[in-house]
Amino acid sequence: MAYEHVHKDFHGALSFALQFLSDRYGRGEMEGYLRQVAREIYGPLRKRLRQEGLKALEEHWRKVFTLEGAEEGRDFTLSYEEGALVLRVRRCPAVHHIKERGYKLAEDFCESTRVVNEGICRPVGYDCSVDYERGAGRCVQRFWREG
Amino acid sequence: MISCTEFIWAYNELFKFLHGRHGKEAVQELWKGISEEFLGNLDELVREKGIDGMREYWTHTLTEEGADYVMTVKEDAFYIDMHRCPSVALISEGPSSKYPHYCEHCAWLYPPLLEKSGFEAHMHIIDPERGECRLSVYRRCPRAGS
């Protein structure tokens, strides 16, 4: 985790940046950027996932969502189903802040979760999926060990 | 979801990505785009309230970000002396190297926006490694009697 000062307008700035990349350079470049984010920023989380397993991701998501003001049980849940870690988001803090403040939600804002999650999981023998309803601020993310 | 607490790292990574793939001009185009299209809330505050709007905007954002700064507000001038930029501190403690021109983004974001509302603005980068800088803003046509 970076620091504990929470400035939620950064979600709007990230949304702007994703749309800028996609509009100017294409979706492939936007995904390339997100893969770089997964590699460079989430390197320590990736390392923990390799060493500690899904518990590392569970702790990461709990801390992230709690810092963002989400309440476990009401806004999100974390559970294990058939060996997979399941993160159910009922009220995404990012999507809701962007909408509340009137920022534009990038077309691929929710898709960025898939690209980053894959970038964290796949290099260390895990896989993941994301089912979302764009703009609704709800999704189900699953993480499991490959093989 | 990339947490807003990790955004500065993602922002720094974006500058590095764009520079590496498309050159520094692409990074400057992004900064120009943020200034013109994303900072509508600051633009609106400055248009409506002038220097009071600047005080309101930066008091809110710099408090949320945990900055160490001194803000000076005068009738026709506004200054922020940043002693420890929270973004620079965060990047220096983070997992990835700092974009060498990181601090320049503030000069592209804020002065052009403030100048549209009748102010003259300068961003002086004092020490990019320590995150020290000064934003100086002056009303172009001081109010009568001031």
Image (cartoon, grey):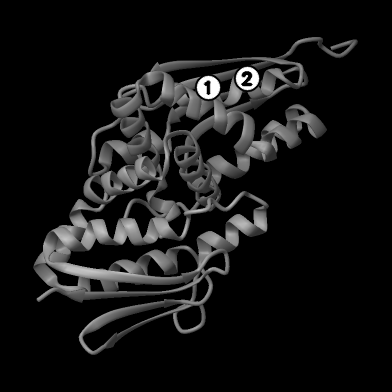
What amino acid is at disc 1? Trp
In percent of width and height, residue A100 lies at 66, 59
Taking depth in this image into account, of A133 and B115 the one nearest to the observer is: A133
Can you identify the residue that label 1 sits on?
B108
Mark 2 and mark 1 residues within 8 Å of each other at the beta carbon: yes
Taking depth in this image into account, of A147 and A57 the one nearest to the observer is: A147
Tell me: residue B111, above or below residue A143: above
Residue B91 got which mark? none
Q: Chain of mark 2?
A: B
Say few, some or many: other residues with alpha carbon within 10 Å of mark 1 (under 14 / 14 to 19 / 20 or more): some
Q: Quadrant of the C terminus of chain B?
A: top right
Residue at 68%, 31% in the rendered image? B54
As helix, strand or loop, the secondary structure at mark 2 comes to helix
Residue at 41%, 16% in the rendered image? B126
Which residue appears farthest toward the right when viewing the image?
Answer: B144
What amino acid is at disc 2? Pro
Residue B112 got which mark? 2
> How many discs appear?
2
Rendering quarter of residue B119: top right
Q: Chain of mark 1?
A: B
